Amino acid sequence: MGFIWIILIIVGIYFFYNSNHNVNKFLHKKSADDIIKERFANGEIDEETYMKMKDALRK
């Protein structure tokens, strides 16, 4: 019977950690600057577009 409690505690800790981790990811919102940096790094936009977007955000 004690073995079942240990398994339940481990499973509970696992689900608590995962739900807490997912909430933190959901609550952390990227800034517009972070998004355009990421798009530039991924090759989705070229340097000229990146600079125009960056300048537009600074205004």
Image (spheres, rainbow, N blue to C red):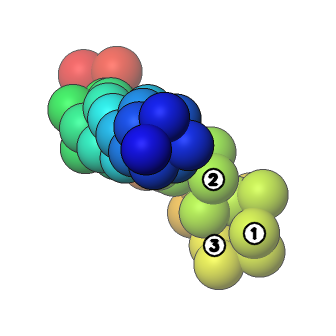
51 or 30, which is in the foreground?
30
Circle 3 residues within 10 Å: few <14, some 14–19, many ≥20: some
Q: Amino acid at mark 3?
A: Ile
Residue 22: x, y in percent?
34, 46
Q: Position of residue 31 (x, y in %)?
A: 34, 32
Q: Secondary structure at mark 1?
A: loop
Q: What residue would you read off at disc 1? A: 42
Q: Is residue 40 above or below residue 1?
A: below
Q: Which residue is mark 2?
A: 38
Are the residues tagged 2 and 3 within 8 Å (C-beta)? no
Label 2 to label 1: alpha-carbon separation: 6 Å
For the point 65% across and 78% down, the residue is 44
Along the viewing direction, whichever of 5 and 51 lies nearer the viewer: 5
Numbered mark located on residue 45 in the image: 3
Say which quarter of the image contains residue 32: top left
Q: Position of residue 11 (x, y in %)?
A: 45, 48
Query: In the rendered view of the protein, which quadrant contains the N terminus?
Result: top left
